[in-house]
Structures are given as structure tokens and as C-alpha cells.
Image: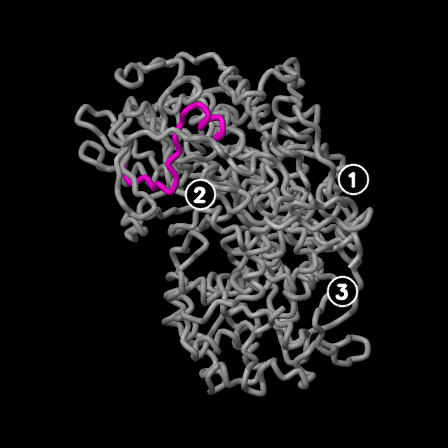
Amino acid sequence: MKKPLLGSFEPPAAGNKHMLGALQHIHLPMRRFKELEEVDYVIVGVGSAGGVLLQRLARAGFNVVGLEAGPFWDTERDWVSDEAGSHDLYWEDPRVTGGTDPLAFGSNNCGKGVGGGSVHWAAFTPRLHPSDFEIYTRDGVGTDWPITYEEIRPYYEQLELEMPVAGPAYYPWGHPHGYPYGPHPMGGVGNALIRGCSALDIPVCIGGPVAILSGSHGDRPHCIYRGFCIQGCKVGAKASTLITHVPDALHSGAEIRDNSMAARVSLGKDGRVNGVHYFDKDGREHFQRAKSVILCGYAIETPRLLLNSACPGFELGLANSSDTVGRYLMAQAGTVVLGRFDQLVRMYKAPPAHALTEEFYETDPKNDFARGFAIQTVGPLPAAFGKQMVSAKKAWGWGLRREMMDYNHWASFGLLGEILPWPENRVTLADEKDRFGLPIAHVSFNLHENDKRLIKAATQKTIEVMHAAGATEVVHEARYAHLVGAARMGSDPRTSVVDKFGRSHDIANLFICDGSIMPTQGSANPGLTIQALAARTADYLISQARTIFTGSKRDMTTPPIRRELAPPDTWGKGVPRFTHLLSAGR
Amino acid sequence: MTTKNRETSETPNQQGDAADTSLVPRDPLTGDAILPRTQPGYYAGFTTLSQQSFWDAATRKVIDKRVNHQPPIRFFNPTEASFWTTVFDHLIPQTDRTPDHRIAILPTLDERLYHDRTNGYRYEDMPHDREAYHLAFDAINQEARSEYRADFISLPYLQQDLVLKTLHDGEPKAAPEIWKQMSVHRFWLLLIGDAIDIYYAHPWAWDEIGFGGPAYPRAYIRLERGEPEPWEAEEQRYDWVAPDHAVSGEIEATHEFYLESVQHRSHRRKHERLP
């Protein structure tokens, strides 16, 4: 074995003192509320949205408790640089999946533990495009959002600073903008995407946008390119709300009750919710009283909780007078295109989220489908790659062993394609129960003609790019990525679950804020949008002060953005903006 | 390193018998059998385990447990255990490895099923994972008996390979009443997915494919052009072909399938392709 450059490293001292970063442990005294104490807000799920809401509301002075079904991570002790050893990060409680095109869950899209899915996302953070907010008006498909791009734009800019996001100084698609941290150096897969796109004259963006530090930030070190992003970033370079917002939330007086599985939202005789029943780690049931409840459980658990909270007056499920809870669930087409190169690639190095093109994002009249797709880098680790070889080449036995021996010769791109919202793509309750006796989720998912055409065209285009990059063999694995919808926002209470601020149409002090409120999804990874929506909902709740706790009046005035509520040191830094280009288009 | 890795099979037709050259890979030019090695693959001398002192303690602990502390068999009975061990000898054949450097698959699967751990979802056309393995034990034996008039485990290697290929192809002939209860291709993906998850989680498999493994807190520093870290190895390729008595060496690309729901199924179901 050769020595490292400049001679051998000193092995780490006993007790593993050789570690990076100061934020490996969060040693903050945490406030503890009593269950009988009526807090201002109970937040169910401390993930991408819940983490941001918890931080904002606590900093604004509210009494707030976050219930999280999974554990509070001690990252140095609990996380490993290992594909097979990271299952605890994923929501692996039982679910049933079906329909003509069943979705995979678990590691593919569902997180458990403080930080939720943001702990194991790849951290690609493109924004939605302005067109995404009005696809019904533009293309006659899906539905329009009750807000425009301009309403969410300040929150995109703000969260890109809070994470912060590394990427190019000029990002040309959608509403052009730039990023606060510089792009990452390229690894082998990113280089392949640049080569392929350049050969075909397709604009390509390199080194981001990705919420991974390219330079140290506060007490967080920058990326060390070890490639285990989706197994949890032990380095602390990748943004998760566990390290970006939760520390400040605790510092500001929020409580996080981990290993607490919400069972039912409780409705009082006055038609308002008054708290949440939940189970602790040992299966004991508790009830936390609250003046208002915010559900941040993501696209499966939020509708499941509402359906499991059915009660007199809401027989179909809480806040479900529209029969929309659970419906319009969306995943994005996430087909992985793999190319074999004569030269070595070693795709396990560097973040999987590394380079992308959104050149095919918008509706193109030349296509036989509406909307579009992005092409991004992905970098599967060995077991994930092996299963891709099973799908793409029907490999097994000796054939599989042979393909795997060529692991270092392969690069992989993932397409990210917009699948439209359909009412029968939905979450319902199965007969089966989980270990707490709660009915588990059944998910049904079917592709429609527009979806299928889009997936086929996107796959073919991505294959073309891979060939142009110089791959001698190109195959693909069809799959899905991300989840949104299932409790969508809208102006019409008959066809949506919450209003544009996340307040349920049916119950004045019940809010939903996570991926499930998105009416459509575009071809952008949803993480940034989810956090931006959370910060916006927080500003609304704060601007309404205590009226939410007693009144039912619905003030639909958009509040001003409160940058001063961001975690310290994350706002006021320069970020290039290109506002004059928005109206001109590209 | 201790290597109590595999109950080498008792029957002579199993892959423990390295002397049977019809069961080991061959050099395509000379036709000679390639003798089993401690480390097959193109990265001779590369060992991720030699870098352990540069890994963080939590990762070291997980890998040490995996390599040196095999879980006991508690879910499968002895007959099932030896049956599935034989099946995995086909899904991930290891006759190119010396017996003391083979990677055991069954104990880790047994531990998963014993604790009833899943990936977080079950397809509606599939029973629970535990039940799926019980059903498939019967179905595969029925296939073996109907085609070759013997239980799966007592067949020669090639016929065992052919029995399993019917599952791979999605077209088993026997046991229709069992396959009515679960999807053939979903079971195949479950089975081979388990095999991949376990085999390619072992550091010896990382060495075989040239995967650098854990790199925290040390970092990777050579990102471009697929170059090795100073402690990684250069690739040294050699040609090999699958053993004569194996049918799993061939690959068929699924180019024309664009949807997950049809990509895994039999290539003969052309009507399910997109226009």
C-alpha cells in the first residue's frame, strides 16, 4: 500500500479525537415544557420544513415544541461512512405501495430523525421556475399555485444564504440568479456531464447549486468530497436543518421531543385543534396541549396523520371536507442513465449533486408532452449501482460480478422530470397497523400519458448526452425521486387542503407546512422550496401574532420577510441578483 | 482477520469444490481455468481495511462487526439455511475466491428477517419479506422437481442455475399457485437486492471493485480523471469469462423500457413497451 502524499498520516488518537468541525455534538441546554402546559405551537416532524419553522417561531418568542418520530442525532456517534450502515436515517416503518407504477420509499425519499430528509438528501437546491406557479394557465395541465414566483423569491434568496448554497455566480434558467458560495471542483461524473452537454451545445451549470459548503461557514467545515452525502454528512458541510436551524431553535427556547410518534391530532368541541396525541419510544401515549398545530410530516405521514385523526364532523379525515387529503401525490421521474467509459471515473468521490442542466425544463411546443425535465449528476455507491445493473442489464450471477468489477468505469446522470398531479395518485390507510397500532399508509401511484411521454423523451435526451460525453455503452434504470403533494394548497377550499400560507381551510388553527402542500413540483429538487415555504409560513404566523390562537379570521395579507429572524450570521451577505432579466426572459 | 465466512457446501456439486474447473472462470484466450484468488478483480493488493485507522470510530465499529462477528442463524431452519446459501452461490457466485476469502450472505439476511427489518415499504402484490422467502423456498423446489425430478439442493450446479434463471426471466413454470400470491419479478429484485446489499457491503468486495470506502475524516483529494488516491491502487485488468457450467454470464440490456413498472419484467412482454 502506497503512503499518502507527503508521507503517512498520523493515525487518529485513541478515542477518535481526529474529527472535523465543531458542530458534531450539539451541547445546548434544552428547554422542557410540561405536557399539561399549553404551548403556542406543536410542530409534528422536525425535518426540512419543521426545523425552519421551529427556529423562526422560537426566535420570535413563541413557546414551541417539535415532535419528531426519530432520534436526535449525535452525528459523530450515530452516523457512519457506510452504505449498509445508514438505514436508521430513513423512514423504514411499514407502508404498502401499489398502483400501476408503484413508488419506492425508505432511503429513496423518506427521512426519520431530527433533520428529517434533509439529513440524507443529496442537497441539490435549484429553485422552481416562474412558470411552475402557473402551469394550468400556460399549458392547461395540472393546476396553478395560489402564489407566484415573486412571492416566494425573497425566501429562496434568504434560504440560499442560510444553508448556504454553493453554485455559479450566474445561473441562467428560470429567474436568473447567482449563489453566495463558489461552485465545487468537478469530479468525474460532473466532468462527463460538462463534456456531453458541451458537445451538444447544451448550456450546463457546474459545481452546484448544492447546499454543501465549498468554503467553511461559521463553525462548519467545507466539503471533503468523501461521497457519502446521502448517508448523512458526518463532516457537517452539507446543510440539514439539524445543523442549520435546529441549534438556533434550541438556543431560542424551542423543545424537540425525539422518538415521539404522533398518533392523532385532537379536535375540540369548538372546532379548533387543541393538541397532539403521541407515543414515546416505549409506546406510552402522551398528549401535548397547544394553541395551534403545524404538521410537517412530509407527503406520506402528514396525510396519514390527518386520515388517522378522523373524528365526528371529519369522518373522512381531519381537515378533509374537500376529500383532497392524500390526493395529488407526486414523485418526479428520476431515471438514472449510466454510461461506461474506457477511462476510469471513480464516481464515488465528490458529492453526487454536482452539475446539471435545466435547458429542457420548460414546455416546448415541439414535444408531444407538456412541461419538461432537468438532467443532473448522480453518483451511486456500490450497492445502489449493483441494483441499477440488475434493472438496466438484467445482470445476475457472474454477469453481475463482472459489471461490478467495472464500477470505476461508470458515470451516471439522473433525469428529473415533472410528473403532473392526479387525484387518484393518493395516500389512504391500509388495514395493516404499525407497532403503535396505527393504521399504516397505502400509496397508489399511476402514470398518465403526459408523464410517460415526458419520461421517454427525457430518458432519450439523457442517453444522447451520455453518448456525447464519450461513453461507449449507455444503459438506464427507470425510477422515481422525491415526493410532494397529498395535502395541496389552493384558493378553493373545495379542491385543496390549505390556503397559500399553509392554514387548513377547515380548521383555523391547524397548519400544514412541508412538501405535501405543493400543488405541482416542476423539475427542481423540492428541498429548497420546502424550506422557503416554511420560512414564509413562519413570517405569516409571526405577523398574525396571537390572533391565530383565538380567532378564525383569515387575513390573507402577505407579510414582509423578516430577515432578522434568520439564524445569526446567515443574512446580509452579498448575493448577486439579476432582477432585470426576469421580465425580459431568456 | 477471522474468516468463518461460509459453510462450505457438503455436496460435491457445490462451489466449494474448486478442483472442478467447469465451475471457475476461464481465460478466454487460453481456455485455462483461472485459479481462485484471495482477491479477484483488477485492483491487486488494494485493501480498504488497511486504511481503518483513518476512519472514524463509529464507522470502524460497524465494519469490524460486519467482517469479524457474524450473526447466528435464527430465522431460517437448517434446511432453509443451506437452501438459501446454495441459491446465493448462484446469485453472487464466488468460486473465483479462495474458500477463506468468500463473503457469507446468508447470516446477514437471516438477521434482517429475524428482526423483521425492511426497506420501509411492501409492494401490494407482495407478501411480507419473511413470508416471501418461505413461499419462494417451496416455489423454487417445485420448479426443480417439475423440471429435473429432484429437490433444488441436490441438483448439479448448472441445473440449479437454470432453475433460478426461470425466476430471473420472470417465467417459472411450476408453482403457479405460489406465484399468484407474489410477483415473480418483485421477488427476484428482493432476493438479488438482498444479495447485493450484503456482498457489496463487505470490504473485500470494495477491494475487488476498487471502491475506496470510508474517507472521513481524511477526505478524498483526487477528484478528476478517475485518478487514485495515493493509498488507492491502479487498475490492472485481465480477461475472464464465466465458468462453463453457469448461465448467468450473459447480459441483456433493457434499452426499450422506460418505466420502472415494466423494466424488470420479462423481455418477452413487448406489448408493455411504450410506443
Marks 1/2: CA–CA distance: 42 Å
Residue A65 appears in the rendering: yes
- On the image, numbered disc 2 is attached to which residue? A112
Q: Say if labels 2 and 3 share a chain.
A: no
Q: Position of residue A428 (x, y in %)?
A: 33, 44
User: Magenta segment: does it hold A263?
Assistant: yes
| Secondary structure of residue under mark 1 | helix
| Secondary structure of residue under mark 3 | loop
- On the image, numbered disc 1 is attached to which residue? A199
In the figure, residue A235 lies in which quadrant? top right
Q: Position of residue A431 (x, y in %)?
A: 28, 52
Q: Say if labels 1 and 2 share a chain.
A: yes
Looking at the picture, which amino acid does disc 1 mark? Ala
| Secondary structure of residue under mark 2 | loop
Please tell me which residue lies in front, A144 or B59.
B59
- Chain at numbered mark 3: B
B156 relative position to B79: left or right: right
Marks 2/3: CA–CA distance: 39 Å
Looking at the picture, which amino acid does disc 2 mark? Lys
Please tell me which residue lies in front, A450 or A30.
A30
Residue, x 56% and y 51% (percent of image)?
B58
Marks 3/1: CA–CA distance: 38 Å
Relative to B219, does residue B148 appear above or below in the rendering? below
| Span highlighted in magenta in the image | A246-264
Relative to A260, does residue B35 appear above or below in the rendering? below
Relative to B241, does residue B127 appear above or below in the rendering? above
Looking at the picture, which amino acid does disc 3 mark? Gly
In the figure, residue A552 lies in which quadrant? top left
Single out the mark in the foreground, 3 or 1. Answer: 3
Single out the mark in the foreground, 2 or 3. Answer: 3
Q: Counting residues from the N terminus, which is met first, the one under dot 1 or under dot 2?
A: 2
- On the image, numbered disc 3 is attached to which residue? B45
